[in-house]
Image: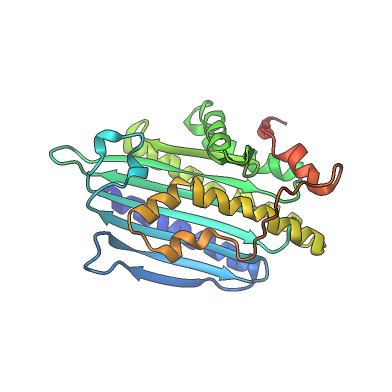
Amino acid sequence: MQTDQVRIYLLDLQSRILDALQAADGQSFRRDAWTRPADSPLQGEGVSSLIEFGGLLERGGCNFSHVRGPRLPPSATQHRPELAGAPFEALGISLVFHPTNPYVPTVHMNVRMLMANPDGQSPVAWFGGGMDLTPYYGFEEDARHFHRTCQTALAPFGDDHYPRFKAWCDEYFFLKHRNEPRGIGGVFFDDYNEGGFEQGFALMRAVGDAFLPAYLPIVERRRDLPYGERERDFQAYRRGRYVEFNLVWDRGTHFGLQSGGRTESILMSMPPIVKWRYDWHPEAGSPEAQLYDVFLKPRDWAAE
């Protein structure tokens, strides 16, 4: 079955990512296997894996879930109204890593398949996912590396995929109420069924397999840079934007909560230390201002 192929791949991807990040962090992930109660309308199981206050990660989670429900929630059918109310299966890996060192960027990656089973019709499957980088103190070398790795991963699917999915990422991870991007982007795609199941699955694998090569070299370059309270304070302030986006705009968060998903797993993306200030602006010419002036602007990083 198609869902079996996807499940096997996703569990292997989760294992590879956890092994690599445990080696980098020095602390083991807490692995929490769960199963939905028998009387719950949403059935299924998953494995939530979390580190808190480790050697590298202040908080990091990498979760697998495979759930089945009687009705697609509204967040999943806004582009496919003809499937509203159909039974569904959803499989995916979702991760967010919040390093302690402010010079190491936060990263998010998600790959998933959603399959609807409308009455009297053949199943309809589509894929989504991507990865994006959220620095606090930016480095152009890191931004170029991250985007070029994404570009290389998508190259076998056509020259149009990277620029298309980069633009989609810039548009999606944008805080409309702040009029600013969450970070430097990456790639994002949703509702993807071009070329049928085989192409969609291959695309999902390409993105998932590119995550470690995209992120780990940045971690190794920045993890030992010295920092102080000023940098930690700015990091906590900018993390507030991350929280705002995930709660206000993110479709994955909305899907999980609307479908009755496991709250602890859905909200594992929240950083443990966050600050908000009223109408704060960085001092002109400061390293903090450079984030706004240089990095929170749409740029063709892969071509630079």
Task: Locate residue 3 relative to residue 208 in the image: left or right.
Answer: left
Q: Please provide percent x and percent y for residue 166.
A: 57, 34
The answer to whether one can see residue 212 in this image is no
Q: Residue furthest left?
A: 120
How many marks on residues?
0
Task: Locate residue 274 relative to residue 81 in the image: left or right.
Answer: right
Residue located 22% across and 68% down the image: 38
Q: Camera-side residue: 102 or 7?
A: 102
Asked if 130 appears above or below 91 in the picture, the reply is above
Q: Please provide percent x and percent y for residue 201.
A: 38, 42
Q: Please provide percent x and percent y for residue 86.
A: 22, 44
Q: Residue furthest front?
A: 278
> Where does the C terminus fall, quadrant-wise?
top right
Q: Please provide percent x and percent y for residue 72.
A: 28, 46
Task: Locate residue 11 relative to residue 4 in the image: left or right.
Answer: right
Q: Residue furthest right?
A: 285
What is the quadrant of residue 122 in the picture?
Answer: top left
Q: Camera-side residue: 133 or 287?
A: 287
Residue located 37% across and 44% down the image: 75
